[in-house]
Amino acid sequence: MANTAQSKKRARQNERRYEINKARRSRIRTFLRRVEEAIASGDQAAAKEALQSAQPELMRGVSKGIVHKNTAARKMSRLTHRVKSLG
């Protein structure tokens, strides 16, 4: 339990950051899911378009500290490879 004014403020800030980060993480997962669904349907054009819209979201997650840089690079690399192999 937070006792000092500083610890109470930090607790409030942590709650707020948690909500913001949760929303961002959810948004990134949604974009990645759209790419996965397009790949599963076998439509390369749709998959390519979904991948192009997912990349900035993933990179924004990196800059905001939600996703590690190497994790984002790995995800993009694997998705790109899967999209290319559709054609």
Image (cartoon, helix red, strand yellow):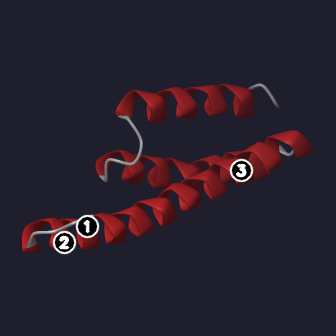
State how many labels appear. 3
Give me the C-alpha separation between circle 3 and circle 1: 32 Å
Q: Considering only order in the chain, which callout, 1 or 3, is on the residue closer to the N terminus?
A: 1
Q: Residues within 10 Å of mark 3 (few under 14, many from 20)?
A: some
Residue 21 spot, x, y in % from top left: 41, 60
User: Which quadrant would the C terminus be assigned to in this image?
Assistant: top right
**Dot 1 lies on which element?**
helix
Q: Residues within 10 Å of mark 2 (few under 14, many from 20)?
A: few
Q: Considering only order in the chain, which callout, 3 or 2, is on the residue closer to the N terminus?
A: 2
Q: Which of marks 2 and 3 is in front?
A: 2
Q: Nearer the viewer, mark 3 or mark 1?
A: 1
The amino acid type, in three-letter code, at marker 2 is Lys
The residue that label 1 is drawn on is: 11
Apparent side of residue 10 relative to residue 1 in the rendered image (left or right): left
Q: Is residue 13 visible?
A: yes
Apparent side of residue 87 relative to residue 22 in the rendered image (left or right): right
**Which residue is found at the position 25% from the left and 67% from the top?**
11
User: Which quadrant would the N terminus be assigned to in this image?
Assistant: bottom left
**Which residue is found at the position 40% from the left and 51% from the top?**
61
